[in-house]
Image (cartoon, helix red, strand yellow):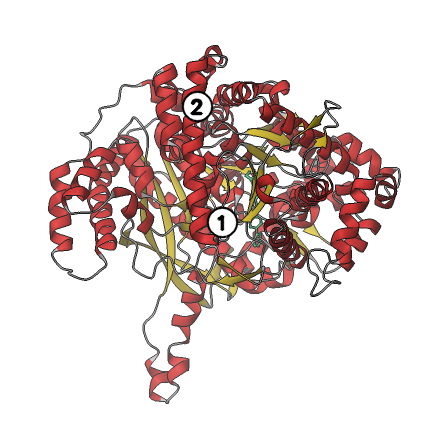
């Protein structure tokens, strides 16, 4: 254990919990100003202001303690932090729900209503951004000196509307009424340069940017649980660095005189969606550089304040790259150290390599970030020079170790010379990092065998695995109070601090009294979702039906379409045999297990195939839900505008968690963990973290199906022909023919014909190859659900096995293996 993890063992002095009187005073003050109907909004603002005051005290104490630290501060750089709402989570962390509820009650408001009033901070696309948010929570909880660094986007993840079954993107206006949680820090502003040229004077190179903007800090304070420590999320906002251009204004060029305002503000406009096939977007590069430059300048300023000399920066600071989006860090850190602080190249490189580490989140080669050399030269000329120099020194080292090998140098180079020359950000991140990690055992293994194989041969010890985790504070204690109470009553409260204590649940898995409590908690959560579905969609669903749920970004590799094809197969079977069916598993005639299949998730705006899947889900839902022959046996529900706060309502209500990506494609998954922690059983492929979850829970308690990674590769190598599966499997044929023939869109029967024909010709994610195995696994699900005792026992065993997937554990591993002081890391 490093010094950093040792810290969590120190006794912490807890501040008193929320002061109800202060909340009441604040409410009085805020509410007295309004007699209109926006009392809830005022209630939210008053609650936020009160809590923020508390958190600011904790923040000051944390900073004072961290100044005296002997270990490293972690600086987690991410273009995305998918935070969701703050109030409910903060109340859990501060143990303040009761005080808040009482205070609001006196003002005639319900806490639940006020919680619903808050906008999500949706500053992320999906898994990568939500992981960063879980990590902030856990860094505060574990007691790691830490800052998260990100951008303060005016518009976060778009909000999704569905019109005629089709996705419509609407701008996310989360800042429309201000953000009561943030502290604007006008004194913390740094100059960010763009463009211009490199000047040489007296042998010293110096960047003279053509344009500058100011990056201004806005802080969000993230409380830890059972500690008064906090973490900080520092978000940068760009502002123009000069005021109105009066010369232009006087010439009558009004728009021109304000051009720089617009140009600076464009950096704050929006979060880029995850559809980055066309990576040549200059604004994104500028955003990434602003994050990198402002954060590094802030870190160095703090380091100089605390420790005087810049040479020790790498000893006291870890700089972590959440994927390659902040991978300009090495170039900018080298520039600051050499050009601004007068350090020699070798010393600067040592500092950089001490500080930097990088997490990879995807294996798909097309998703690896690169930037055109020409664009980089235009926007960041000095950085391109530095990247060239890093590359040259790196390739020299390679040649010294392996001899002159042109082919190897071409593959490893930081610059892709085939076609338009492009800088490979992953290569830059790897060369500059002392540790590179993947996010599940399988992913980390494939990473060193495929995309980074050449680098792993060079530096095997740099590549490690750190399996993802999720914070139980939000995903169990806040999202699922019913389950939380049941856990407390069944095994005591230790699990809240030490998630591996969930293992003690195993002893209760067969006990009838444990079953009744668990079932009651699940049913209450299902009822809440039933109410939401009725309110938002007008569909009535039976809370006793099996809730079969797939919620995540819509992507071909995640195979929502495979799920939907099983829904169609089930629909056809119900119509053919409304009374019951021959269960393939048992060989017996059984009545149908009523199911509610729930989908939710957004498609990237330019991702045509994903949008088509959303439309097909709606078409199938309409036909199935209105077919009187089906009744309660099957319902299909698509909940629009998936978000963190919607996930908090859906996940606790799930019986079955769909984690069905093609083996080898999902780096880890984190939704899978949230479901299992909330007592859902997983139907999943041998992919990402599903594998480690199955091992921890017991494979007998998970529905595993489908080809494994090596079998996927072998199938493709053998010349996979999806049509053979179609021809051999009558059920599959029925499904494909129905979708293709327009059964679900009779008014426009050709709508899905091309999509299905394409699937028969080219099925890169092997839906057809896995279909039969998937249906067999689904039949097992039905059999088990009919035996409620057996089902609940397994559900409890799922929760029991999931303690290892807390992000507190993940953070402790990063501290030990990645962020520990040089020499201390394994
Ligand atoms: C890149 C360039 C330009 C614009 C956008 C992007 C971009 C943005 C977001 C590229 C990728 C992402 C997000 C990736 C992501 O969420 N990956 C997921 O990371 C999770 C946390 O490790 C894993 O659990 C998931 O398996 C992985 O898909």
Task: Determine whether the residue tagged by mark 2 lies in a helix, strand or loop.
Answer: helix
Rendered view: 531 above or below 421: above
800, 245: nearer the viewer: 800
Tell me residue 412's x, y (percent).
71, 42
Secondary element at image label 1: loop
Counting from the top left corner in percent of width and height, residue 207 is at 48, 60
Q: Quadrant of the N terminus?
A: top left
User: 266 above or below 245?
Assistant: above
Q: For mark 1, what is the residue? A: 642
Nearest to viewer (mark 1 / mark 2): 2
Q: CA distance from mark 1 to mark 2?
A: 26 Å
| Up-down relation of residue 100 to residue 184 (above or below) | above
Q: Is mark 2 within 8 Å of ligand 1?
A: no
Tally of marks = 2
Question: Which quarter of the figure is the C terminus placed in?
Answer: top right
Image coordinates of residue 366 in percent, x first then y, are 69, 50
Disc 2: which residue: 518
Q: Are marks 1 and 2 in contact (CB under 8 Å)?
A: no
Identify the residue shown where x is 83% and y is 39%: 729
Instruction: Work out which residue is located at the far bottom of the displayed protein and give it.
Output: 252
**Earlier residue among tags 1 and 2:** 2
Q: Is residue 752 left or right of residue 471?
A: right
Quadrant in which ligand 1 is drawn: top right
Tell me, yes or no, if residue 297 can be seen here: yes
Residue 336 in view of the camera: no
Question: Residue 244 appears in which quarter of the rendering?
Answer: bottom left
């Amino acid at each position: 254990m490093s010094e950093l993890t040792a810290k969590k063992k120190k006794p912490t002095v807890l501040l008193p919990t929320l002061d109800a009187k202060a909340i009441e005073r604040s409410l009085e003050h805020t509410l007295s100003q309004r007699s209109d109907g926006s009392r809830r909004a005022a209630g939210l603002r008053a609650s936020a202001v009160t809590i923020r005051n508390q958190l600011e005290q904790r923040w000051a104490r944390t900073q004072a303690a961290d100044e005296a630290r002997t270990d490293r501060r972690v600086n987690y750089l991410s273009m995305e932090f998918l935070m969701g709402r703050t109030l409910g989570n903060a109340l859990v962390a501060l143990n303040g729900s009761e005080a808040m509820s009482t205070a609001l009650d006196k003002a005639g408001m319900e806490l639940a209503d006020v919680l619903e009033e808050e906008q999500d901070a949706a500053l992320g696309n999906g898994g990568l951004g939500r992981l960063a948010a879980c990590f902030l929570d856990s860094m505060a909880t574990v007691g790691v000196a830490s800052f998260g660094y990100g951008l303060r986007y005016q518009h976060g993840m778009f909000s999704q509307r569905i019109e005629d079954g089709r996705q419509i993107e609407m701008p996310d206006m989360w800042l429309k009424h201000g953000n009561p949680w943030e502290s604007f820090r006008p004194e913390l502003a740094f100059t960010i340069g763009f463009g211009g040229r490199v000047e040489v004077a007296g042998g010293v190179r110096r960047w003279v940017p053509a344009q500058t903007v100011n990056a201004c800090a806005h802080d969000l304070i993230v409380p830890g649980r059972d500690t008064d420590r906090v973490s900080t999320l520092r978000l940068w906002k760009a502002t123009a660095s000069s005021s109105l251009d009066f010369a232009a204004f006087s010439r009558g060029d009004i728009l021109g005189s304000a051009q720089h305002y617009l140009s600076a503000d464009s950096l704050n406009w929006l979060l880029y969606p995850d559809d980055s096939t066309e990576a040549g977007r200059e604004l994104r590069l500028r955003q990434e550089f602003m994050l990198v430059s402002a954060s590094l300048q802030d870190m160095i300023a703090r380091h100089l304040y605390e420790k005087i000399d810049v040479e020790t920066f790498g000893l006291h600071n870890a700089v972590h790259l959440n994927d390659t989006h902040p991978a300009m860090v090495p170039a900018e850190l080298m520039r600051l150290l050499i050009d601004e602080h007068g350090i020699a190249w070798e010393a600067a490189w040592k500092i950089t390599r001490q500080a930097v580490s990088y997490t990879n989140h995807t294996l798909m080669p097309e998703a690896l970030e690169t930037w055109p050399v020409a664009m980089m030269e235009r926007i960041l000329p000095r950085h391109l020079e530095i990247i060239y120099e890093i590359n040259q020194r790196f390739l020299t080292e390679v040649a010294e170790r392996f001899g002159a090998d042109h082919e190897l140098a071409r593959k490893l180079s930081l610059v892709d010379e085939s076609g338009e020359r492009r800088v490979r950000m992953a290569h830059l991140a790897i060369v500059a990092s002392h540790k590179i990690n993947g996010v599940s055992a399988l992913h980390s293994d494939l990473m060193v065998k495929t995309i980074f194989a050449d680098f792993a041969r060079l530096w095997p010890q740099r590549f490690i695995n750190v399996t993802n985790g999720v914070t139980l504070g939000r995903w169990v204690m806040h999202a699922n109070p019913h389950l939380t109470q049941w856990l407390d009553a069944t095994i005591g409260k230790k699990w809240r601090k030490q998630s591996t204590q969930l293992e003690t649940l195993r002893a209760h898995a067969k006990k009838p009294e444990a079953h009744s409590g668990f079932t009651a908690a699940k049913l209450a959560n299902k009822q809440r979702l039933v109410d939401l579905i009725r309110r938002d969609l007008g569909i009535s669903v039976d809370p006793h039906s099996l809730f079969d749920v797939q919620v995540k970004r819509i992507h071909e590799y995640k195979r929502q379409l495979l799920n939907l094809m099983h829904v169609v197969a089930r629909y056809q079977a119900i119509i053919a045999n409304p009374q019951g069916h021959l269960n393939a598993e048992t060989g017996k005639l059984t009545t149908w297990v009523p199911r509610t299949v729930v989908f939710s998730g957004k498609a990237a705006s330019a991702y045509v195939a994903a949008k088509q899947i959303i439309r097909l889900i709606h078409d199938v839902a309409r036909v199935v839900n209105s077919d009187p022959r089906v009744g309660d046996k099957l319902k299909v529900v698509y909940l629009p505008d998936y978000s963190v706060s919607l996930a908090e309502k859906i996940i606790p209500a799930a019986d079955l968690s769909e984690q069905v990506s093609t083996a080898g494609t999902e780096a880890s998954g984190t939704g899978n963990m949230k479901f299992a922690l909330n007592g859902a059983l997983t139907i999943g492929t041998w992919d990402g973290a599903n594998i480690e979850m199955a091992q921890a829970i017991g494979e007998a308690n998970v529905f595993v199906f489908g080809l494994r990674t090596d079998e996927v590769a072998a199938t493709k190598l053998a010349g996979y022909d999806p049509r053979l599966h179609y021809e051999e499997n009558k059920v599959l044929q029925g499904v494909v023919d129905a979708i293709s023939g327009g059964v679900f869109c009779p008014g426009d029967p050709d709508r899905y014909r091309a999509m299905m024909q394409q699937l028969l010709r080219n099925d890169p994610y092997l839906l057809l190859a896995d279909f039969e195995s998937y249906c067999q696994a689904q039949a097992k699900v039905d059999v088990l659900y009919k035996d409620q005792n057996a089902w609940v026992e397994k559900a409890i065993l799922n929760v029991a096995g999931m303690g290892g997937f807390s992000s507190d554990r993940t953070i402790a591993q990063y501290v030990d293996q990645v962020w520990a002081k040089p020499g201390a890391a394994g």
